[in-house]
Each structure stands twice: as C-alpha cells, then as structure tokens.
Image (cartoon, grey):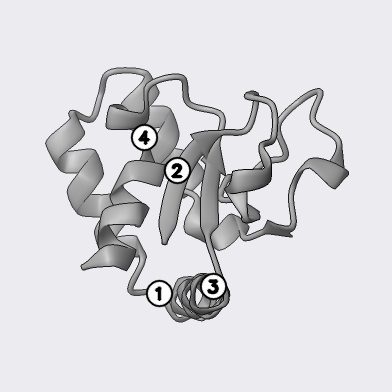
Amino acid sequence: MIAAGRIYDPPAESDGTRVLIMRLWPRGIRKSRVDLWLKELGPVLPLLRGFRAGEIDWAEYTRRYLKGLARPEAQAQVATVRAAAENGRVTLLCGCPNETRCHRSLLRAYLLD
C-alpha cells in the first residue's frame, strides 16, 4: 500500500515507512519525522519554481515531472520505495498543501500503475 500525506501533518502509526520526496528539507521538521529522504523523487527546482510562479500549467508540470522519473538516479529511488512497499505501508510526504496539485499524487499514481 502506498499513501500520500503532508509532512506538516502529525505522524500516525498507520503511516508505515514515512518517505520525504522533496529536494529541499522542509523548515521546522525534525529528521526523526521521516524514515527516508529521497530527494531525487522531488521535482527539479526550475520545474517547481516555474509551476509555483504560474509559468507552467499543471498539465505541463505533470508531463515534465513524470519524464524526470526516467532519470537513473530517480529510478533507483523508485526501486527503494517499491521495495519498502513490499514490506508494508509507505507514505509519500511533501509540504504542498493541496495533494491534488502536488508531485506526491503523481508519484503515488506512477508507483501504483
């Protein structure tokens, strides 16, 4: 089972392995709140900045993010998440407030496909 959540929400026992998928460490979060930090699964910074600035729409962001998952370093971390999911629940964590417009929802769908 692969779930998605927000890093700023309190941890729950049901989270299983908590995996942070952001390039930069979120402010105010202790390292003990996550089990793995897989920054290669976060969007590259130019893509994220362009999306937040409104220069890139959601469809283009989605296309570019998913294309970026083909990079060897990202594929290695995808394999890490899949291996963890074989042993129990994995929760993908990011700081975005809206899960429907966040790469964690894209990554979750990619992993479940």
Residue 23 showing in the rendered view: no
**Quadrant position of residue 48:** top left
In what element is the residue under mark 1?
loop
Amino acid tagged 4: Cys
**Quadrant position of residue 36:** bottom right
| Numbered disc in front, either 3 or 1 | 3
Query: Disc 3 designates what residue?
Result: 77
Query: Disc 4 designates what residue?
Result: 102
What residue lies at 42% left-to-right and 57% top-to-bottom?
2
Give residue 85's position: percent from left, percent from top.
50, 71
Mark 4 / mark 2, whichever is N-terminal: 2
Q: Can you tell which mark lies on residue 71?
A: 1
| Numbered disc in front, either 4 or 2 | 2
Mark 3 / mark 4, whichever is N-terminal: 3
What residue lies at 50% left-to-right and 42% top-to-bottom?
45
Amino acid tagged 3: Gln
Alpha carbon distance from label 4 to label 1: 19 Å
Mark 4 / mark 1, whichever is N-terminal: 1
In the displayed structure, 20 sits above or below 46; it is: below
In what element is the residue under mark 2?
strand
Give residue 54's position: percent from left, percent from top.
27, 18
Query: Disc 2 designates what residue?
Result: 4
Q: Are marks 4 and 2 in contact (CB under 8 Å)?
A: yes
